[in-house]
Amino acid sequence: MKINTDILNIKIRDDLWLKPEYLNHKIISGNKLRKLKLNIAKSKTMGYHSLLTFGGAFSNHIAAVAQVGKDYGFNTIGIIRGEELRFKINENPTLKFAASCGMRLNFVSRESFRDKSSEAFLQKLKDEFGPFYHLPEGGTNDLAVKGCEEILTAKDANFDYICCPVGTGGTIAGLINSSKPHQKILGFPALKGDFLKTDIAKFAKKNNWILVNDYHFGGYAKINMELISFINRFKAEYNIQLDPIYTAKMMYGVLDMIHNEKFPSDARILAIHTGGLQGIQGMNMRLQEMNLPLIQ
């Protein structure tokens, strides 16, 4: 898989720069590309012709796997949370895109979806779909973390703090493992819950990290007027689009911490933009239903 590595960090202010991982591929961008790279190579080596994974209605991971299948000749199967979505594919931009790439969408109840990691459930899927290479929800596994270790380069060694949004923990684990001894990694969870610490610790090889739990805006995919206004102001000022689920919450948090002097005055900070821009269209559909302003 080809990753565009010829991209430069973007200066936001004297003490804050942004790494635009959303520019590393025209479609399969950001951390999803990093997570899939080595998994796709392994699946080819093992002779698999099908990829199976899991996700929700507006999953960046589902969209990325669907595109990978189209580009690299894999059959793809998406196990989607929510049986009611079966009749709403054309109303959902992410699922519509995945289907257009050739992904076979299989809708299951939320109760069944919770069993996605159990051997019994996976065996049932193998019986139904035949042999497949299993990609977990969100894409995080050992190879995904190793792929994310390539995000930081030698040019990033002069930063003191590396900040990134956190979903399943694979991206921050990769950043932790590839960080320099003087660097501290700050993760900004997009969802509530202390379980992320345990998930990250399974893959992280260093202890130079913390989670900042003050900026999830109520939980996963939660949004309000304050965050919408921040996203639109940020784009107007810097011409950079932030996704509302992950990167916007991180950037809001980083700038708020700078404003409140939570970093040393001479700190150099690098924030990782992990992509996820495909989800904006779906979020705007929700905002319209809620009579809230749209993300521009």
Image (spheres, grey):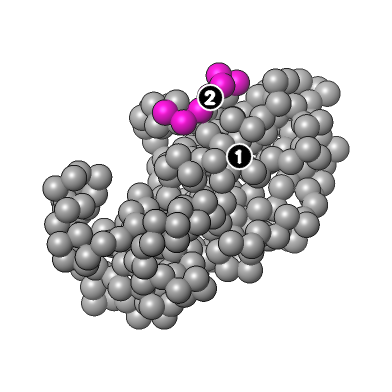
Q: Is residue 97 visible?
A: no
Q: Is residue 171 above or below residue 69?
A: above
In the image, 54: left or right of 176? Answer: left
Neighbour class for label 2 at 10 Å: few (<14), some, many (≥20)? Answer: few
Task: Pick the quarter of the image with the N terminus.
Answer: bottom right
Q: Is residue 126 left or right of residue 247?
A: left
Q: Which amino acid is tagged 2?
A: Lys
Seen in the image, is 64 located left or right of residue 10? left
Q: Is residue 200 above or below residue 67?
A: above
SS under mark 1: loop
Element on which disc 2 rests: loop
Instruction: Tell which of 143 and 231 is nearer to you.
Output: 143
Is the C terminus in the top left, top right, bottom left or bottom right quadrant? bottom right
The answer to which image quadrant residue 93 occupies is bottom left
Q: Is residue 133 magenta?
A: no
Image position of 270 with respect to 103: above or below = above
Residue at the spot x=56%, y=46% of the render? 147
Nearest to the observer: residue 254 or residue 127: 127
- The picture places residue 19, in percent across and down from the top left corner, at 71, 47
Kindly report the secondary structure that dominates the magenta region of the rendered protein.
loop
Under mark 1, the amino acid is Glu
Residue 99: x and y in percent read 37, 77
The residue singled out by tag 1 in the image is 149
Where are the magenta residues, as a range?
A: 202-208
Q: Which residue is mark 2?
A: 205
Q: Residue at x 73, y 20 (%)?
A: 182
Check if residue 205 falls in the magenta segment: yes
